[in-house]
Amino acid sequence: MRPVPGASPGLYLRLVLMAACWGGQFVAGRVAAPLLPPFTAGALRLATAIVILLALVRVLEGGLPRPDARGLALLAALGFTGVFAWNACFFPALERVPAGRGALIMALNPIGTALGMWLIFRERLSRGRWAGIALALVGAAIVIARGDLPSLFSGALGTGELLLFGSVLGWVSYTLIGRGVLGRVSPLAMTTWAALLGGGMLALAALFERPWAAVADLPARGWLAITYIGIFGTVLAFLFFSEGVRRIGPSRTAIFINFVPVFGVAFSALFLGEPILASMVIGGLMVIGGVLLTTRPSPAAAPRRVRAQRAGAGMRPGE
């Protein structure tokens, strides 16, 4: 990776820490999932994040902008897909699937985004990108089936894996909808609005879970897990990601997301004692390789990228 204007060793370190924060979410989610109902766990996580996000948007941008009716509808869609649906699937999934395997399956987010761009926005996919999609999907199948691919047709694909695919779908939808929102508000304001609206949906759903006893009896490790996801997995990782997009562009920043499953598997083995299977290593490398192929800029985009780099600070975050 060549140095570019605005890059520094400190920035690259923060982007690695961003991946570590997101990788640690799977360990924290695995800890919290058996202790709390899913909507309650999501609502508590968002409550922690919202307090910090509101303070940040106040200090950094002077307050939260008021969207028009169409903008509010788009922000509500973001809250539903990337916050409500994502959390509703994430926590019950990690109650059924080991954290390391979950991190590898969730690494398919860029693959889903590329397919969504092709289906909805008719973005062209080169043969290399199609090869990357196929490689990543085969790698995910190896991880899910623990190396025994025929078992996919005899029960290896369970409820937990399907819920993780639901989280992937939620995040892909959030990413695609976000394209139409970033022209209206900043990334920080968009995230804050999505957290507020999606967190409100989670809080309403949590009322039907009658979580009072579970929250009152939540042990210290549960509170630590929820606090970690809210602060490190939501706010801190977002700030590092946004800084990367602003200073070196979205394509280069996205490369660091490939470290997320690596940290997820490593932390799961270190803190939860989960075994690292050969199928996880092989399948995980295939997933990461497929993602790299799929997210690699096409040759036609190179001249535009060079012009954007020469433009320097004229590029807005998210472009």
Image (cartoon, rainbow, N blue to C red):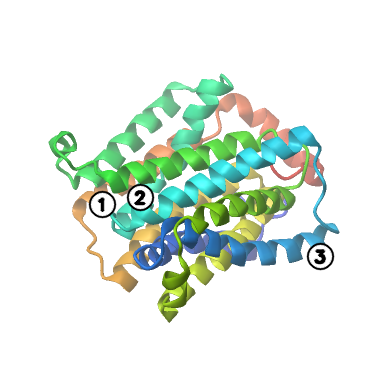
Asked if the residue at tag 2 contacts the one at tag 3, i.e. Cβ–Cβ closer than 8 Å, the answer is no
Query: How far apart in space, not on screen, are marks 1 and 3 (Cα)?
Result: 43 Å
x 13%, y 35%: residue: 150
Residue with the mark numbered 2: 104
Mark 1 secondary-structure assignment? helix
Which of pointers 1 and 3 indicates the residue nearer the eye?
3
Query: How far apart in space, not on screen, are marks 2 and 1 (Cα)?
Result: 8 Å
Instruction: Residue 231: give x, y in percent of width and height.
Output: 58, 67
Give left or right: position of 246 versus 165: right
Query: How far apart in space, not on screen, are marks 3 and 2 (Cα)?
Result: 36 Å
The answer to which quarter of the image holds residue 63 is: bottom right
Nearer the N terminus, badge 1 or badge 3?
3
Name which residue type carries label 2.
Leu
Mark 3 secondary-structure assignment? helix
Mark 2 secondary-structure assignment? helix
Picture quarter with the C terminus = top right
Give left or right: position of 212 versus 304: left
User: How packed is label 1: few (under 14 Cα within 10 Å), some, or many (20 or more)?
Assistant: many
Q: Which mark is residue 59?
A: 3
